Image (cartoon, coloured by chain):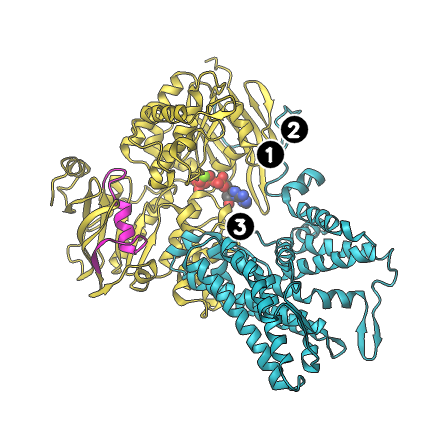
Chain colours: A cyan, B yellow
Amino acid sequence: MTTISRWRALTHHHLFWPVAVLIALLLVNVPFTPDFFSINMTDGHLYGSLVSIVLFGSPLILVAVGMTLVIATGGIDLSVGAVVAITGALTCSYISDQADQNTLSAVFLAMGIGLVAAVVCGLWNGFLVARMGIQPIIATLIIMVAGRGVAQLITDGQIITVNSEPYKLIGGGYWLTLPFSVFVVAAVVAVTVALTRRTALGLLVESVGGNAEASRLVGIRSTRIKIMVYMFCALCAGIAGLMISSNTSAADGNNAGLWIELDAILAVVIGGTSLLGGRFSIGGTVVGALVIQTLTTTIYTIGVPTQTNLVFKAAVVIVVCLLQSPKFRAKVFGAKGPQGPRQGAAPVEPAPAADAAPKMEVSR
Amino acid sequence: MAEPQPVLEMTGIVKEFPGVRALSGVDFRLFPGEIHALMGENGAGKSTLIKVLTGVYSLDGGTITLDGESVRFGSPLQAQQAGISTVYQEVNLCPNLSVAENIFIGREPTRAGRIQWKRMRKEAAELVDRLGLDIDVAAPLSSYPLAVQQLVAIVRSVGTGDRDGAGFGTKVLVLDEPTSSLDRDEVLELFRLMRQLRDEGVAILFVSHFLDQIYEVCDRMTVLRNGTLVGEHLVRDLDQVGLIELMIGKALDQLEELHEHQMRSDVGETLVKAEGLGRTGGIAPFDLEINKGEVLGLAGLLGSGRTELARLLFGADQPDSGKVTIGGKQVSMSAPNDAIAAGVAFCSENRKSEGLVPDLTVRENIILALQAARGWTRPIPASQRDELVAAYIKALDIRPADPEARVGRLSGGNQQKVLLARWLITQPKLLILDEPTRGIDIGAKTEIQKLVVSLSEDGMSVLYIAAELEEVLRLSHTIGVLRDRRLVARLTNGPEITTSKILETIASGEHQ
Ligand SMILES: Nc1ncnc2c1ncn2[C@@H]1O[C@H](COP(=O)(O)OP(=O)(O)OP(=O)(O)O)[C@@H](O)[C@H]1O
Ligand SMILES: [Mg+2]
């Protein structure tokens, strides 16, 4: 393979642009924080900006991974933020009711309760979408709106704080020098990849999202698949909810996971999964979530005023999405892709005669 | 003989896709007032040449001259505004809009910026009338079968020509396999219209795999093979055998005659039995038996209910009445899964919207039905899967023979083969084929028909639907005749059964 064709193959890889953007964003930080890439060991824990990005980005990665599958079926789940809040509220209120908050069994039971609640939310979403045929955006809007109210009810409108060492571990603890949440994320991503690519689930999900009617006629039980996927997405959001509440040792029904659904959707799109459904890429989503988290970090390090940081974020997201569009790239860089550049209709100078291909017996 | 100036001239056209050189230096010219056939096997580059012309794809090399001026269109809309009207191979209209809206989309009659709905419907009705069609232009397009949708696409393109005052003078009309799902009558109607436009000076580019149609209506043809030009001929100078040789690049060992195929009278026991099966608005209740190893062909005109009958037998639509037994067991037919589990396979006529998942690869599309039957927890082992896929790509000669290629990027005929492969791989007991040879080139068409014969000899039952009566007649042991959404007769094939006999039965509509 020539260098050029190798370069082409690289730039055509579906992860190329997300990774390129991630690296660029990371580099932007260096002038502002010269030791941005350095990682120190203190008390047997690794610290550094990169570690923080992964740590704080963990919940987003989880939510985005679940969201990827939902989007691949041609749906969307707006309720994940509310599910984060509900899970955190239930778990924390159960733990805070305990006499000894450090009992392992109680903590496990509390997390179990939270996660079951999350899965039930997913079941509800899936039921509305797949069984009742309600538009996903509307169906999941119900829990998005009502869910925060439920979380408030659970916490009596208060912020519940907990003081539990074991619980602190998942969102704020360290293990083997790394934040524990990194392991949780790695496990969830590994399980998701195995679940979708080792079995036929991924193929069936892509088929349902890619052509729903054809999938029905081919005998795919899309109702079941969709319900499963919404439940899985909610489960991921639930785990993120545990992480967030564990990290702050508190459950805030109002603010936990606020707007995380939007960040997650962005992460999925940046990762290269189309909102129209069909092909998805878990790896892309993970990179996409890291891009969003890095962006959030960058906004702080380069000191964008808080009032304008959303605008800044929006601007970067637009650039990323444009970069990913083959049409845009063709216009700007003049690269040739399958859909190639589309020149204007204006008459053009005659192109050099293409080196004449063998023309056989052209009789006129 | 001094030739007139061509209205359209394409020179040295090159188009490359990653890994495929779809067109390498093709020359093509089109004269005003001629009907020009673009011929070639599946994947030869016909549709690509058309899409390069109309700005769907960009050019990688070569020039296009329209009316003596060098042009390059950035979008199909620009091409249309310059006077090139196109019907693409895959019908791409908006199914949820009305027929009238589809005809006028993008150029609705307006007054003071507001769409004149009444006028639009009236003009649409007139256009549709001109083609001798009886359809309600206010109804959503999706309520009509594929053939009608195809006709609407044609009406839409030719309609642009005679909207006086709107400035849409069609100079070039491009029709990419417009007749692939039409019946004889609509084809004749279309030809009448094409000739009329030709006589008005419009240049028409026509793609079809039906050689008889080419010889009936075309004046000149250009033949492509593997993305290269092999020749331009006047139709009267080249006979069918010569044409086929040009297309496939070798002498043809005489197209296999299927007529000789022995009609076995000893077809096995009853496999499928439908009693009083019907659906309001689809097809009147009918009784039907299909034996093991029998090929049952369905004959009928457009809209006679052939597809509707097939869909009921597959559970694609829910019946209002009746029951189905397969292999002696009653099947609920509440969803396709039930039928599939009972061994029924259904190859839809509409490969784009009901068949393929364009984003997935050839391999994934081929194994989809088999995988769906196994459920998501039991993936087909990779080695077995690859072997199966490779075997079917080879058997059906799917090109490119790359299991990783995205199906959406295959040529129309090759997509059709992928759809066939998907169902063949499941080894069904009853294979329902709705227009299986749609868009398939002449060589492959014979192959597929031979395949049907050999499958039936191996004991598979086949329900065969095709617009071409000869095709039905050639393959079927029994022919079910439909008329006005009613199964009116069942004829046992034999020497006395001819196409005219079938047409007579359709016309008289006498029951049994
Ligand atoms: N968008 C695309 N990306 C990649 N390859 C493509 C694309 N479109 C077409 N091709 C390839 O270009 C070649 C020519 O395809 P084309 O659709 O022009 O064939 P065709 O002559 O119209 O065949 P058919 O009779 O089956 O419609 C094929 O090998 C096809 O796979
Ligand atoms: Mg084609």
| Image position, residue A252 (x, y; %) | 66, 67
- Graded by Cα atoms within 10 Å as few (under 14), some (14 to 19) or many (20 or more), the crowding at tag 1 reads many
The disc at residue B59 is: 1
Residue nearest the observer in this picture, A129 or A250: A250
Q: Amino acid at mark 3?
A: Leu
Residue at the disc numbered 2: A351
Residue nearest the observer in this picture, A141 or B200: A141
Q: Which structural element holds mark 2? A: loop
| Image position, residue B150 (x, y; %) | 38, 36
Mark-to-mark CA distance, 1 and 3: 28 Å
* Residue B315 visible in the current orientation: yes
Image point (74%, 79%), residue name: A176
Mark 1 against mark 3, which lies toward the viewer? 3
Q: Residue furthest top?
A: B2
Residue at the disc numbered 3: A276
| Image position, residue B71 (x, y; %) | 59, 24
